[in-house]
Amino acid sequence: MQSEINSIMQNINCQIIYGTYKADENAISLALKFGFKNFDSASHYGNADIIYNAIKNNNIPRNEINITSKIWKDEAGYKKTQEACKKILESLHTDYIDTLLIHWPDKNNNLNLETWNALENLKISGLVKNIGLSNFLPHHADIILKSCKIKPSIVQLEFHPGYMQFPAVKYFQDNNIQVQAWSPLARGRIFNDELITGLAKKYNVTPAQICLNFCKRENIIPIVKASDSEHFDEILNAFKFEIEQNDLWKLETMPQTGWSGEHPDRERVKI
């Protein structure tokens, strides 16, 4: 069983990320045992110590793990971002972060640029390997792209069937910025949608597997969550089939549904 898991994970490790929001140490440890190497976190989650303990207790070398963290809204600005990065490093007991993102854009574009400048210098110093954005839409990101010394390499967006944000996805993909999907399963809100359930029956898979496979077809990396072996198996088997083009079009054009209600230009940010 373990050899099969290892083989599967070698093929999909670049296509999937384990999300640690509200995950406990047992869940993160199980993710490690299932072969996950990429972990998404944020300073706002307050779980860096849990991630560190899980990695340490499972005897996984640090250089085999990729950790993403994010700078929260009240940490924006050059000096605060530098300080936030230092705290993340201390909590993770590491001397570098694989990827550091701005969690949400500020309404003040100058503050966004100041925060980005801090990320650039953190990368130049070697404390961070990759830098990017989260929840930035084209009108937020374009200001950074037009003035940056180092271009973002990653952006995280809410993305799932029923909430594709295709104009934003196209903008980032056209600029060679890798899109990662948070809430790729819409937190289960679309599992009873008639299109999703119909396709799940057609391909003999689960609604969750339809959603994850859809991300793959759109060249988007999903950030997933699981806390038991059954759900980890479901995730690992989500990439063993191909959605036919006609069905892909149906998913791409389905009515908006399952949206979290979180938007960078509105005040309803619940995370």
Image (cartoon, rainbow, N blue to C red):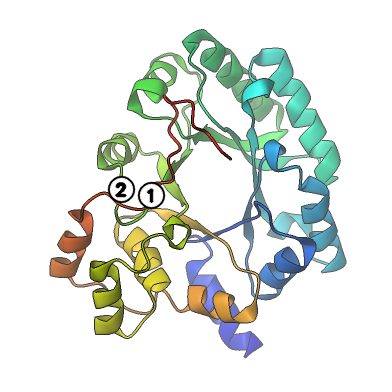
**Quadrant where the C terminus lies?**
top right
Lateral position of residue 226 relative to residue 61, left or right: left
Quarter of the image for residue 216 reads: bottom left
Element type at mark 2: loop
Residue 226: quadrant of the picture: bottom right
Nearer-the-camera pick, 146 or 190 = 190
Q: Which residue is mark 2?
A: 164
Give above or below for 213 relative to 132: below
The disc placed on residue 159 is 1
Tell me whether the residue at label 1 lies in contact with that at label 2, contact meaning CB atoms closer than 8 angstroms.
yes
- Horizontal side of residue 35 vs 160, given as left or right: right
Q: Amino acid at mark 1?
A: Phe
- The picture quadrant where one finds residue 115 is top right
Q: Amino acid at mark 2?
A: Met
Q: Residue furthest top?
A: 110
Q: Earlier in the sequence, mark 1 or mark 2?
A: 1
